[in-house]
Image (cartoon, helix red, strand yellow):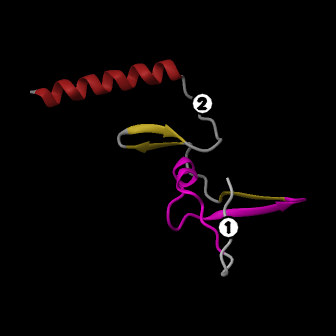
Amino acid sequence: MVITIDKAGRLVVPKPLREQFNLTPGCQLVIEAAANTITLRRADDEPALIRKQGILVHHGTTRAPVDIGEFVRTERRSRSTRIARDAH
């Protein structure tokens, strides 16, 4: 992916990357340089799992210690209960 720096020295992070890493206006980034590489990373310790449209979504590289099978079973039970309750 190629981006261009404007005359003011700004660059735009493409929308797919902003969504993937949950970068929102006001979000702070740390910039690091090494050899011929520039790296950007989030400055805060936001959790790896965030809720989007009612569903937990993993973003970034941090791994959460989650038992996926148990998580799915719990979510299914919760949704079934909510759907049954809302149907009445």
Hey, which quadrant is residue 30 in on the image?
bottom right
From the viewer's side, name the closer residue of 30 and 81: 30
Q: CA distance from mark 1 to mark 2?
A: 38 Å
Q: Which mark is residue 24?
A: none
- The spot of residue 63 in percent (x, y) is 63, 36
Give the crowd class for mark 1: few <14, some 14-19, many >=20 residues within 10 Å.
few
Hey, which quadrant is residue 36 in on the image?
bottom right
Which kind of residue does numbered mark 1 sit on?
Thr
The reply, left or right, for residue 9 in relation to residue 38 is: left
Compared with 2, 54 (above or below) is: above
The reply, left or right, for residue 7 in relation to residue 82 is: right
Give the crowd class for mark 2: few <14, some 14-19, many >=20 residues within 10 Å.
few
Start and end of the magenta stretch? 10-36
- The spot of residue 39 in percent (x, y) is 75, 57
The reply, left or right, for residue 53 in relation to residue 48 is: left
- Of mark 1 and mark 2, the one earlier in the sequence is 1
Q: Residue at x 64, y 74 (%)?
A: 10
The reply, left or right, for residue 37 in relation to residue 26 is: right
Element at badge 2?
loop
Which kind of residue does numbered mark 2 sit on?
Pro
Which residue does the numbered mark 1 point to in the structure image?
4
Element at badge 1?
loop
- The spot of residue 7 in percent (x, y) is 67, 81
Q: Is residue 2 magenta?
A: no
- Viewport quadrant of the C terminus: top left
Q: Which mark is residue 65?
A: 2
Q: Is residue 32 magenta?
A: yes
Hey, which quadrant is residue 52 in on the image?
top left
Q: Residue at x 44, y 37 (%)?
A: 56
Query: Are the residues at dot 1 and dot 2 in contact (C-beta closer than 8 Å)?
Result: no
Choose mark 1 or mark 2, whichever is in front.
1
Compared with 3, 21 (above or below) is: above
